[in-house]
Amino acid sequence: MGRYLGPSCRLCRREGVKLYLKGEKCYTDKCPLVKRNFAPGQHGQEKKKLTQYAMQLREKQKLKRYYGILEEQFVRYYEKAERMKGITGENLLQLLERRLDNVVYRLGFAVSRAQARQLVSHGHIEVNGKKVDIPSYLVKPGDVISIKESSRSMELIKNNLEMGRNVPDWLELNRDAFEGRVISMPRREHIDLPVQEHLIVELYSK
């Protein structure tokens, strides 16, 4: 499975927004984006006027980096979103939000999507009582996502839950039971990402 292995904070600086790729560090003043709020590289501080294509490309790159997926997989999500009923951009966001690694992150079991992906891949997560180790697994309303019983003593997971991050309205969390439930499909108003998805649709529609 391909994934980005370079410096995570460099991606946040490139996009100009926090992508929350480094967990707890992203919530503190140690975040490099706080210290150096400009793009990396020797020309990073230069102000450039972006073309329409450049803005569309930046939105696509930003969305890919939020969810930690590479180009080929992103294209498959877009093609699937295009075939669904409704607005393509919103369909795309809904598919990405329904990924199991994202749901584990949204429930607060992990402090970043990368950490959530690792928890899923290492077999610590169950869906409806059965182990699922595929980060891209798509959840649906009624699914119960829980920490495997033998993994509930992990200090990492306990500490993450104690942070008490907000859980989106389409999910429901029971901290004491180490489980969450999908209560509805995620809608655009539930997804708090500063992304202009219509620009991504324009990019792929050319």
Image (spheres, rainbow, N blue to C red):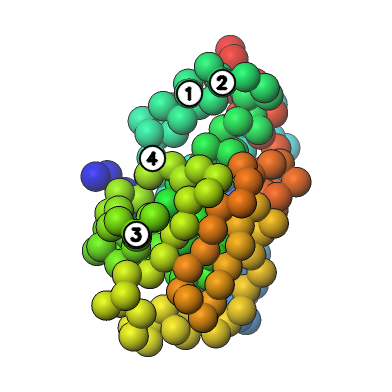
Q: CA distance from mark 2 to mark 1?
A: 7 Å
- Check whether the beta carbons of the residues at disc 2 and disc 1 lie within 8 A of each other: yes
Please state the horizontal and vertical placement of residue 60, each as a whole percent of the image. Answer: 56, 36
Quadrant of residue 32 within the rendered picture: bottom right
- The residue singled out by tag 1 in the image is 80
Q: Residue at x 43, y 51 (%)?
A: 100
Mark 1 or mark 3, which has the lower sequence index?
Answer: 1
Which class describes the residues within 10 Å of circle 4: few (<14), some (14-19), or many (20+)?
some
Q: Is residue 112 visible?
A: no
| Residue 70, numbered label | 4
Q: Residue at x 32, y 75 (%)?
A: 149
Q: CA distance from mark 4 to mark 1?
A: 16 Å
| Residue toward you, 148 or 133 | 148
Identity, as a three-letter code, of the amino acid under mark 4: Leu
- The residue singled out by tag 3 in the image is 129
Which class describes the residues within 10 Å of circle 1: few (<14), some (14-19), or many (20+)?
some
| Residue toward you, 104 or 175 | 175
Q: Secondary structure at mark 1?
A: helix
The answer to whether 108 appears left or right of 189 in the picture is left
| Residue 84, numbered label | 2
Q: CA distance from mark 4 to mark 2?
A: 22 Å
Quadrant of residue 37 within the rendered picture: bottom right
Q: Secondary structure at mark 4?
A: loop
Identity, as a three-letter code, of the amino acid under mark 2: Met
Q: Is residue 147 above or below residue 142?
A: below
Q: CA distance from mark 1 to mark 3?
A: 28 Å
